[in-house]
Each structure stands twice: as C-alpha cells, then as structure tokens.
Image (cartoon, grey):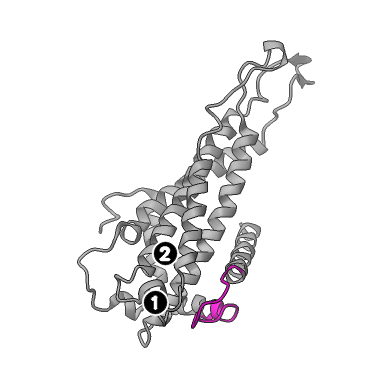
Amino acid sequence: LIHQIRPHKGQLLSAQKISSILKDSQIFTGKKSTVQDPYSFRCIPQVHGASYQAFAHTLEVIETELNSVTDNPLIFEEDGKILSGGNFHAQPLALVLDYLSIAMAELGSISERRVYQLINGDRGLPAFLTMNPGLDSGFMIVQYTAASIVSQSKQLCTPASVDSIVSSKGQEDHVSMAANAATKAYKILDNLKSLIAIEYLVAAQALDFRRPQMSSPQVESLHKQLREKVPFLSEDRLLHDDMIKVKECIEIKLENHFKKS
C-alpha cells in the first residue's frame, strides 16, 4: 500500500523484490522491538528505486549513443553531402555518467549506514558483532573501511560535466569532460562492489547471531553460499581477504547478469 500511492517505477520494483526475497522469513515476521526502523532500512525501496531509475536512464542514453554516428565531418553519400556538425560532443554521456556516479554513490552510502546499524549494539546484536566484546574488535575496523570508501565516492561525485576548458586555439571552447565522468563512475562502481561485499559479510554475521530464528529460503541460500567461502568470525582475523572473496563473487554475478540481458 505504501508504494502504490507513490508509484515511481524503481520504488515499486525494489519493494517487490524485497518482499519476494523476504518471503517466509521468521525474522521478518517476528516480534519487533521498535516501532520504526532507521531510514537506511525503512527507505530501501525509495533510495534503491531512485538509483535503479537512474541506471535505466543511463542505459537508454548509452544505447542511443552506441547506435549513433558521432564523427565529424559526416559524409552522406546518397545525398551527395559532406557536413560539419557537432555530433562528436559528448554532453549526453557526460551528464548521465555524472548522474550514474551519484546514483551508485548513494547506494554505497546507504549500505554503509546499514552496516553501522548492525554493528552498533542497538538492535539486539552484540557490539561489533563479536563473541568477545572488549577483547575482539569484530567488524569495527570494517565499518571504518566502509566509511572511508563512501567518503571517497562522495568526493568523486563532483560533476565532471560542469567543467570545460578551451583548446585548439579557441575553436574547441566548450567540451563535455565525458571521459573524466566515465573514469570517475568506473571507480565509484568498484567502490560500490567493495561496500556491498562488506555489507554482505556483516549481514551474514548478524544472521548467525539471530539463531535459532531463520530468514527466508532465498536469504538462507545466500548465507550458505557465503559461508562456503568465508567462515563465521569467532575471533579477530584479517578481513581483507574475506571482503575480496565476496567482491569477486559479486563481480561474477554482475557479469553473468549482463550476459543474460
């Protein structure tokens, strides 16, 4: 009902996916200790949905660009014309790549906030998700890492498309900086994969502390897949390698997804 009265396509799709993923979860349907969850949980459909729509718009522009002629001059053989124009100007790409960067950075930002909520000891879970609070650091330093990555992504979100510099004796007096927008977006994407990997690790540890309650079959399946690669954190260990393992799995899933689509 909540999402039907604000029918943004991305929000509706995100809400539907969450409902499907959490179907038959004992934890989801169990007794709650709070009236309302923090925004980072409660507003997932709104935030993730907005980013989804940004991705869709970016894809639309890129597909149009891939099917365009952007050279100069342009030769129209059938019309017997050679025309100089401005199809080489990459402003459409620059704008959507900046938009894409912001959308990805926001996914990373809200992900880090969920990580913080799970380790702060206020949700019926031990502080830093460790069995030995005060002795082991648990996931404390992992959240430091996530916060650092998020901050870098935010800094990279300064739009490249608002910049321009004159070259070629003043002939090229307005440029898009689309290449810079693309390289920034690429780095933010890599950061986002790291942040999702961190959230995956933290969420799996939190789920282990919820036992004997079970989540949904889909979530439990994901948890099992992770535990086949990364064991429960019973005492402090270097977590960088764990994060890399999960990040590699995310990259494989993304690659397979785009191959199918």
Residue 37 in percent (x, y) is at: 27, 63
Amino acid type at circle 2 is Val
Q: If you read the primary sequence from the N terminus, does the residue marked by circle 2 or circle 1 appear first? A: 2
Q: Nearer the viewer, residue 70 or 132?
A: 132
Q: Is residue 142 visible?
A: yes
Q: Residues within 10 Å of mark 1 (few under 14, many from 20)?
A: few
| Residue lying at the far front of the rendered structure | 135
- The residue that disc 1 covers is 134
Highlighted magenta segment, given as a residue range: 224-240
Task: For mark 2, give the secondary structure.
Answer: helix
Disc 2: which residue? 115
Residue type pointed to by label 1: Gly
Image quarter (top left, top right, bottom left or bottom right) of the N terminus: bottom left
- Residue 125 in the magenta stretch? The answer is no
Task: Sort mark 2 into few (<14), some (14-19) or many (20+) by Cα contacts within 10 Å.
Answer: many
Q: Residue at x 59, y 37 (%)?
A: 181
Label 1 element class: loop
Please state which of residues 8 and 127 is positioned toward the viewer in this rendering.
Answer: 127
Q: Position of residue 109 (x, y in %)?
A: 43, 53
Give the CA distance from mark 2 to mark 1: 19 Å
Front: mark 2 or 1: 1
> As rendered, which of 225 and 14 lies closer to the eye?
225
